[in-house]
Image (cartoon, rainbow, N blue to C red):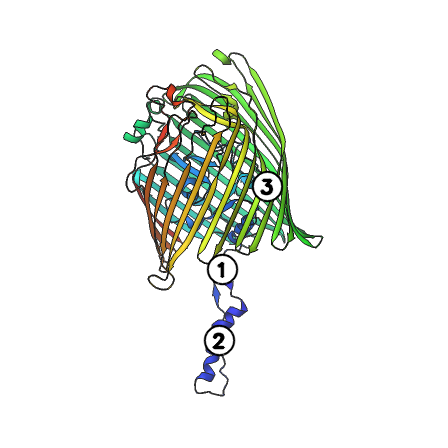
Amino acid sequence: MDRLPRAARAAALAPLLLSGPALGQASDTIALSEITVVGHGPPAGSLTVPSVAEQRAALNATVGSVAFVDAKDFQDSYANNLRDVLKNTPGVFVQERYGQELRLSVRGSGIARGFHLRGIELLQDGIPVNLADGSGDFYQIDPLSLRSLDVYRGGNALAFGATTLGGAVNAVTPTAQTAFAPNILRIDGGSFNSVRENFQVSRVVGPVDVLVNGTITNADGYRRHEAQATRNLNANLGYQLAPGVETRFYLGAYLTDQKLPGSLSLSDALATPRIASAAALTGNQSRQVETERIANRTSFALDLGKLDIDSWAIHKSLYHPIFQVIDQDGWTYGIAPHWAGTFDLGGFRNELLLGLRAFAGQNSALQFVNVGGRRGAQTLRSVQSAANYEAYGENRFWFLPDVALMTGAKLFSANRTYSNKGGFSGTNALPSFANETYEGINPKIGLLWQPLPDIQVFGDITRSRDVPDFSDLVQSSNTTTGVFVPLAAQRAWTIEAGTRGRIDRLSWDVTLYRAEVRDELINYSVSPGLIPAATFNAPRTRHQGVEAAVSLDIARDLAGSGDALVLTQIWTHNDFRFVRDPVFGDNAIAGIPDDVLRTVLRYDHPSGFFVAPSLDWVPRSAFADHANTLRVPGYVLVNLQAGMDFRNGVSVFLDARNLADERYVSDIAVVADARTTPGGPAAFYPGTGRAVYAGLRAAF
């Protein structure tokens, strides 16, 4: 517990000190024993992991579009995946396919990709989760293990060395210094036989602090053949080696067994959404992942600034029966020193960040004929190797007390090497080898104006490059398996302007952006549910849109002192299209709706009770094909959250979703032209129907 400041102790004693003269104007002095008032202050953090308040402040100092999500904002809900964490964040399109499998896209990153993650760097505690080729999964990000989450849209992720079109999402886990409580127990569940159990234990003993968090999840899922079983363990141990020197080790183990229900035709997705595709059933399609992670951050408080040195190693084993059995095993490892400091430059405040990253990985990639989910005859034996070397820097020069000039750049070299060992029939009869190296520099320049402490206005121009991963480079079709297709890196210039802040009862975060893209990596499904997507470079495309969130405290003290009614509107507008493409002309790029809106009305009472109805509205959903011949219907979802915090560490919640049981399409495996498939392509993932969850949490 922290002692209150001297002024607060004086204020607490003032009524007693003044009571003597007031009672009959007695002249005798009243002797009082010393009283010390103590209270719970916010977690202070440490050298390796600053407090949550410091994390938020550092993020908001970014010259560009960013967002901060505190775990307290979603802890009283059934937060099963990143959709549940990021749904109130403008500019982030995140939709469930099934279980923990999502589409996550920022500014159209990986827009047409129907599986996994591309174009966004996913980090945990500032350390990459992506494999060395840039591909990524969501499975090891456990919402119940998070303390906060940072979103750096576009080139604003340069602080981590990331310069992809989509930017970066950094999931921050708690330490014993930043945890809500030393002990947390939680159980929740509900529809579709969903049950989830979570525990967290943390302690601080002298210079050592340790935290362990574990989650077990089991659910049958909304659709047939969608059962999910996950086991996640996150732990970290920090040690203060000396004054101003701290090291922290992170350990993680993540086990996922996810059945895959596959995609359906549009008519089936809307009429019979709970069925699984025939291919998913006959192939017993699933995704079984075992991942182990060890990482370290060692921090040094220097006379000028702070130096962090990150290092990590991730082992991932994947058994994935789909069109064939994908059987992969590989390691990713890296090191990344970065320094940040503030100093005077010619009498002006200057903030500088410098960093290096070197990371690599190798993956043994095998494929077999899928015989009911088991390995049949082998069709591919290959090795995928990736190596990346990066240097980056960002500088903020405050040439006026409230105006900063930001400049930055990243230099990079990324190598992708593919070795097909051959020895199988067809196109894999002979060994083959391919090697591609991508190099470049990504600059950034911008201005930040902060006229008031709670108001910022910014604008910037950034260069991005997205290097293709092995899912892009190694493609299969009806007649070929594991063929290397050389692709160019996607590159873009993005200009953005925005403002964020608060005035009295009104708060806002609004950004407009436009990206001119060259050689965009565009996907389309060759045969949805049967053959994975092909990727090509579109010569020229354009991404532009609006990312907006506005909140208004529309009423206070409705039912007594301290209650509040807050209305929040989140709007993401997407305009992504080809530009004079030789095949698709100026068509919209398929896969993501034009507009995604979310409205939340939340009432909080000082007793700890809250209720929050919400609407998710997609007025006109996405095209299913780049030829723009088939568009998915729009939809409206009605939801309700409510809960009670009993102020003794115990809280309960209710999370009801899609109360009207609306039938809708949540995601699409995009095709080139829907007219080429009789009856339409089986490219649609039905959204989850009516679901109700409840939970109990105890923190002590």
Residues at discs 1 and 2 in contact (Cβ within 8 Å): no
Q: Is residue 265 above or below residue 688?
A: above
Question: Residue 85 appears at what percent x and percent y?
Answer: 43, 43
Closer to the camera in the image, 567 or 150: 567
- The residue shown at (47%, 33%) is 576
Q: Give residue 439's quadrant in the image.
A: top right
Question: Residue 344 appears at what percent x and percent y?
Answer: 69, 53
Residue 539, label in figure: none
Residue 14, label in figure: 2
Q: Is residue 193 left or right of residue 537?
A: left
Callout 1: 10 Å neighbours few (<14), some, many (20+)? few
The mark lying in front, picked from 2 and 3, is: 2
Secondary element under disc 3, as helix, strand or loop, is strand
Q: Earlier in the sequence, mark 2 or mark 3?
A: 2
Mark 1–mark 3 distance (CA, rounded to whole Å): 30 Å
Question: Residue 554 appears at what percent x and percent y?
Answer: 38, 56
Q: Earlier in the sequence, mark 1 or mark 3?
A: 1
The amino acid beneath tag 3 is Asp
Residue that carries the numbered disc 1 in the rendered image: 41
Residue that carries the numbered disc 3 in the rendered image: 310
